[in-house]
Image (cartoon, helix red, strand yellow):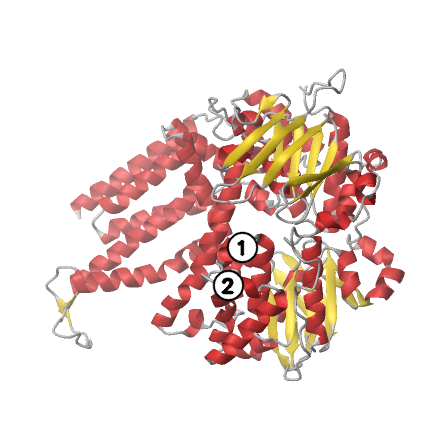
Amino acid sequence: MLPVPEHHVAAAVTFHRFSYRYPDSPRWALQDINLRILPGEFVAVIGPNDAGKSTLCKCLNGIVPHFEGGALKGRVRVHGLDTRSHQVAELARHVGLVLEDPDAQLFAGTVLDEAAFGGENLGMEPDTIRTSVARALRAVGLRGFEDRAPATLSGGQKQRLTIASLLAMTPRVLVFDEATSQLDAEGSRHLMELVCRLKLRYKLTVIVATHDMALASAYADRVLALEAGRLAAFDTPERVFAGPDPSRFFRRAGGAASGRTAAVAADPLVDRCRIDVDALRCEYPGTVAVDDVSAGFAPGEFAGIVGRNGSGKTTLFKAIVGLLEPAAGEVRVAGRPVRTLDPSELVRRVGYVQQNPDHQLFADTVWKEVAFGPVNQGLDRAEVEDRVGRSLEIVGLPDKAQEHPLALGRSDRSLVAFASVLALDSAVILLDEPTRGHDVEGSRRVMEIACSLRDAGRTVIAIGHDLGLLCEYAERLIVMDAGRIVADGPTSEITREQTDVLEAAGVLTTHGAPYELAGAFADDMYDEEQICG
Amino acid sequence: MERLDPRVRIAVVILMSALCFLLRHPATIGAAFAVVLLLWRAVGLEWGQLLAGIKPLRVVFVLIITAQAFFFPGDTPVRVELPRIGLLTLPVTLEGIGFGLMLCLRVLVLACTVPILTSRTSIDRIVLALTRLGLPYRAAYTVTTALNQIPVLRADFATISAAQRLRGSSAFDRGRFLQKVRAYPALVVPLVMTSMRRATLMSVAMQSRAFGSGAARTSIHTLSFRRLDGLILLAAMILFGVLAAVDRVL
């Protein structure tokens, strides 16, 4: 039962002189935080990477300190419960936490079991669980999916399932820790619209940590800005974003605003190379991932590829580097079919920076990690050192050469992975969502690196979800939808003249006014019934 | 089949595993393998999945047969031309090869038996069955979640080896043995690190949903041992008994 307070006096969440330090860390992740969040409020938590957004989210359901350990001062109360003296499992009745990675949060065999997991853990009556699960699944639009395996759902559906599995425990506070960052623009908008609707209907308190300024200003009642673990602002979006230099909340703490990355010198030795994709068709069992795609990429070009999750962008990349055997058509690198290229020759021509840096980092220093490729290429020591030095210079990490790559933060790990591909000195660089895990400033830096590579005569092709950002840097835009290229041309032309195509491909990031949206929902999809009681 | 009591499945799998090591004659182990194949179809698994499951075992089979051929105490030497390693000469024996083959057959039966447990049934039902059979809930959930993670690990491994190959490492494909061994950290470290990161996140997610709340856990599933379950269990026991008896006679 969700109690609706007579007067909104009792706070949903209070932080009282709260500070927290992770074990083995010399730095306080959160420092002297004082704040009150009222029931039914939508609060966006913003700030650059390492400002403490994620830590703040984890404080709300007791993961900090019960799971993480470490030292803390002051207290956090959620609906009157002190998170120090109540265990995570107890707090779970009141606070639901949605994490960034949709896959890591789903572990049951079916959607039904997933949603029932919490209630079962609390020892609720099976009949009660079944009722609340049915209501929760209806509320997020997953009715009829009960017997599906969670692994077969799309990214957006997975996050909706996570929400349903929390709603089934009838919490009063829902916390989202970067929960939309792996979704495409459309998926992220749909999820936030759903959250707004749930918030209004069930008087939920919603706390969302995000890098997305548009999202924060579109949905939040108040914006909570963190800077190096301290509360920098807590006010309405209008006031926070109108304040002095709001961009500082999206900037890395202590880092120089720009100029950390070295420009790539125009290198006449770069072996220029064309990529031609010709009537390409790629299939996975049961689906056509890329269908009749043709495109040519010239040296010195920076092309951005946008499209929904599952529209075939990554599959296209995999075909370009020969990881996939096309069902029809072909990819030619420097005029030769990719399948006829020797692996060492392919590596010299095309470098592929994958989405997740953790899928490739293994060495015990950043230097060795970046040197792995050049050493594999059989270069002599001086050449290897030169390549590693230059690559680290380009991504702005020369001072971290002797650090352990796995001990770095997410954004620096991405940069190390980027540098390790740059060290191959390939003529063409493929970037698969290179800005994931970066804050706004970090994302800009990555885009600037891409531009300087282009200026040095390399071909750069980048997949991205942030249309606005890509448009600022890439001169050519390719829009993919359901495996096909639906638009391809100069960025300015497409964004000016083909907005309908962009809209249909689900890549426009216009967040609407939530209160109007709440009424405009497809009502056959979402049930009107109360979730609880 | 979906409604089959998972306890029956567990019992059949345990019986079959025990039987594999009890049987001594190739004919009866062969018969046991035939029974497993029948069960394989009965629970709705495809032959393609069978082949995909067996394929990675090839290396294990070669290792088993080679090791047994050399080290099994036998007295029928087989003439093979092998380079002498120092003063050490080990005769390859026919008994050794035979024993190796038998061992492979046992491993094959075991490997094909496990998927029968998990196919077409929800992990939750198996967890429930395991807890009803006396296994602590946390242990049961750990086992089944681990099983659930195998396809995820496989996908991770494919991505990781693709990433390293695209960094010019060809040691996994055509390097010499030592080069392969040296290249292994590039595959194993990312795999272990990604799994550990995911495991940490997963345990945060599970705790956020009250895992280990201390309350007596309930389940939306009910296990009912129906007459058909009893019949299937009885039939399996009789069949296994007959196999064991025939094995003694042979």
Q: The residue tagged with tag 2: helix, strand or loop?
A: helix
Which is more toward the observer, B244 or A417?
Answer: A417
Percent coordinates x, y for residue B176 in the rendering? 36, 74
Q: Which residue is mark 1?
A: A408
The correct choice, above or below, for A86 with respect to A333 in the image is above
Task: Say which amino acid is labelled 1.
Answer: Leu
Disc 1 residue crowd, few under 14, some 14–19, many 20+, Cα 10 Å: some
Residue A181 visible in the picture: yes
Task: Say which amino acid is labelled 2.
Answer: Val
The correct choice, above or below, for A49 with respect to B95 in the image is above
What residue is rendered at 83% in x and 44% in y?
A: A242
Which is more toward the observer, B18 or A445?
Answer: A445
What residue is rendered at 41% in x and 67% in y?
A: B183
Percent coordinates x, y for residue A253 in the rendering? 65, 50
Disc 2 residue crowd, few under 14, some 14–19, many 20+, Cα 10 Å: many
Residue, far right: A497
Q: Which residue is mark 2?
A: A366
Q: The residue tagged with tag 1: helix, strand or loop?
A: loop
The correct choice, above or below, for B35 with respect to A278 in the image is above
Identify the subunit bearing mark 2: A
Left or right of A39? Residue A350 is left
Query: Which of the image's four quarters has the N terminus of chain A?
Result: top right
Q: Are marks 1 and 2 on the same chain?
A: yes
What residue is rendered at 64% in x and 34% in y?
A: A33
The correct choice, above or below, for B184 with respect to A337 in the image is above
